[in-house]
Amino acid sequence: MKRRWVYALVLIMAFLWTGSTALAASKGKVVLGMAGSLSTFDPHTFSSLPISMHHTNVFETLLTRKPDGSLTTLLAKSYKMASPKVWEFKLREGLKFSNGDPITAEAVKFSFERILDPKMKSKQYRYFKSIKSLEVVNKYTVRIHTKKPDPMLPPFLAIYGFIVPPKYYKKHNKKFLARNPIGSGPYIVKKWRKGEELIYEENPNASRKPKVKTAVVKFIPESTTRVAALISGDVDVIDNLPPGLSGRVKASKGARVIAKQSPRTNYILMVIKKGAPWMDVRVRRAMNLAIDRNSITKNVMMGFAKPVAVLDGPASFGHNPNLKPYPYNPAKAKKLLAEAGFSKGFEFDVYIPRGRFMMGKEALEGIAGQWARVSLKANVRVMEWGSMKKIIFSKYKDNVKPFLYYLARMNTAFSTEHMFAGAISSRSAYGGFRDKGIDKLINEARSTMDNTARDKKYQEIGRILRHEKVPIIPLYQTFRIYGVSKKLSWTPRADGKLIASEVGLAGAN
Amino acid sequence: MAGYVVKRVIQAIFLLKLVMVIVFLLLHMTGDPVSVMMDTDATQEDIDYMKKLMGFDQPLWVQYGRFFKNAVRGDFGESIEHGEPAMALVLERLPATLEMALGAFTFAVVIGIPFGCLAAFKEGSIYDKSCVGITVLIQAVPDFWLAIMFIMFFSVFLGVLPSFGRGGWQHFIMPAFAASSYHLARLARLMRSQMLEVMRQDYITTARAKGLNEKVILMVHALKNSAIPIVTVLGLDLGILLGGTVIIEVVFAWPGVGRLVVQAIANRDFPIVQSAVFLMASGFVIINLTVDLIYAYLDPRISYS
């Protein structure tokens, strides 16, 4: 009787085992386990990191970023500023979309007009809102006319502004196009089940070949499961590996940890208005000096973060390499607080969204502990993101007590200007600092067309912010951490994107 | 009977409407989709422009009026994030949710009820004691932890089951069992206590005195009479499983409605949330009605005419 049970069990186990090996067979393809889900394959409606990562496989932009982060051409052969308000692009000739349609200046014009069309309600509009019109000069030359001089256009042309075949995109409705993309990227979408899996197949008409013929993306939101899937061999590479789980990947036989500093800067913003102790710049400086950034990056982030001086890292245009992160100096912080009349400290709220930024809550709790040593009592308030935004947008209302808030921003445009506009300028919806002088400097820099001169201006703004105005509490840039099977060959990108067509098999090339 | 059903259906329609209004107001009070979807580098100007384009600058009652007008015609609007009809997106995910919910429900019934019965039948035995102990343990263990332990053991250590996703029956076992664990244990315990109570009733003693076969007593007299609370709990369980296996869906990357809705709530993607709430509330209403009708069958003293 007992023995029969054992036989049955062995049989069941054998059956289960054969079932799962059939699944694991993966020759000539790679399987990616990715955290973020993809909502649409219409390249002109939404914007998010998962969208730009996936759309890059299927569509192409005029410009692009090399893995090292430098700006280069893609569909464009060359580009130049024809006059301050005109950018001119010469396209590579003879290229085709995956359906065989030719890639022409007309397609470029159509694609941008589709983004700018108010009926599309495109979230990408704001990246291209400076565009006034597009002009087809000849089959392979297109000009972008801007409302005012816009040197910031090229970095955005390397992220969004995917070029599509006009005929196909005019013929079909929005609903159909959300699932059935046609582009010129290395892959075409063979099958896509939302929230489940996405299968890429080599695009026969592409000018750039993918590293592997077939790439399968599995959408796995839970990090523990992604790690289990990697270790058990169900997937070959995973993204968004939490620092706490990196040890488990390192200890596994088949996989390793690859990490690279990304342009994702974490910082704490302050609502600088009447009634806030930090209206006084000495207090802001003291709050910065009281934080031991090295300890946080080492102990909380487990080394997967690097302190920054202002808002950007070394890969950004306009980064000032002479600026150092604020040193840890609690004695000086105490002295500054006393000078400002806060020798007994003060109490305040600091908000952070739940589960949005890597180890954000843990880091902020560490920082609150360091602040407590200089008598600053920070109440860490963990919020749902939508509700927290509502609080941020009410910051200047009279009945709202001044507060602090922790944010992080992925700067895939590698532009200091972009960070200033989003956190320092008084036009920013998220910033808490208003200074006419700084606004003027930012505007001046943005309309400076000469790259060297503009770079200098941003560096100077960085210096003023770091040493004189101290409008924010810069923290660090986090790394993007991946678990990668040893059978893969892949170089992590400076912009933090995991692009399926760039993932190759070791020894294949 | 027919009159009762009609009355219940009319009640249900009002209930659904109320639920929709509450969800609409709650979501709008805690943030609007434009603010949520605009990245942290947006200017106020950008946000205002998008709000105007999408109609979120209008007063709340105008927005609700527009939503309601379309909803009664079965049009729940277009998802903000996906750019596709919201109801279709929810319906697309429904099979996966149904598969897991019904699977978990079946596990709970097929395992929970016999175990409970047997424990009651052999009251005081080692079997009974271990059954009680195990079910308490299972009930106390959070399902996501159990799910992760399953993955660690069966996928990583033994390598016999796929670690995530939907597909063949191998994909289905772990998530369905993890989702059912709590319900299974509760059902077994409830079944046991109900059976014990019924077994002490006079009519069971009478049946025994009449010399009826013990099996007949157990299956016919005891089981049916202890079924009413069980049916109530089953109805609740099924409702919960249909609407709330979010954590299990996330852990196993199971492409169900729960994940879609949680994402939609985070993004304030109202059309998706409304569609899903409508479906789930309808499901609950139908299950409740069915449960009430089963009562009448189980206990002839209950009548709805």
Image (tube, coloured by chain):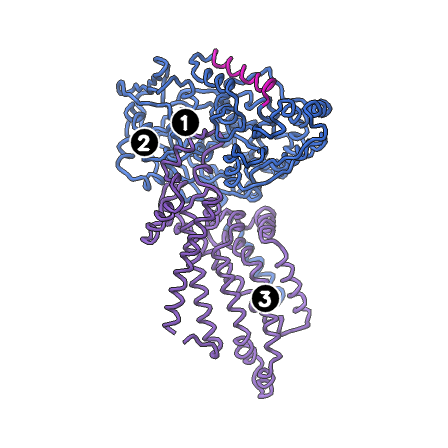
Q: Which residues are magenta?
A: A453-470
Left or right of A182: which side holds A326? right
Left or right of B115: which side holds B100? left
Q: Vertically, is A94 above or below A54?
A: above
Q: CA distance from mark 2 to mark 3?
A: 60 Å
Q: Colour of chain B?
A: purple
Where in the figure is residue B145, as x and y percent of width and height?
60, 50
Total numbered labels placed on residues in the image: 3
Label 3 secondary element: helix
The chain carrying label 2 is A
- Indicate the amino acid at tag 1: Tyr
- Indicate the amino acid at tag 3: Ala
Q: Residues within 10 Å of mark 2 (few under 14, many from 20)?
A: few
Q: Vertically, is B244 above or below B297?
A: above
Where in the figure is residue A382, as x and y percent of width and height?
59, 40
Label 2 secondary element: loop
Where in the figure is residue A286, as x and y percent of width and height?
66, 25
Instruction: Identify the residue under disc 2.
Output: A117
- Indicate the amino acid at tag 2: Asp
Please identify the quadrant where the N terminus of chain A is shown. Answer: bottom right
Nearer to the camera, B88 or A10: B88
Q: Nearer the viewer, mark 1 or mark 3?
A: 1
Q: Nearer the viewer, mark 2 or mark 3?
A: 2
Q: Is residue A466 magenta?
A: yes
Q: Colour of chain A?
A: blue
Q: CA distance from mark 1 to mark 2?
A: 13 Å
**Quadrant of the image occupied by residue B49:** top left
Q: At x 40% / y 28%, what residue is drawn? A: A126
Marks 1 & 2, CB-CB < 8 Å contact: no
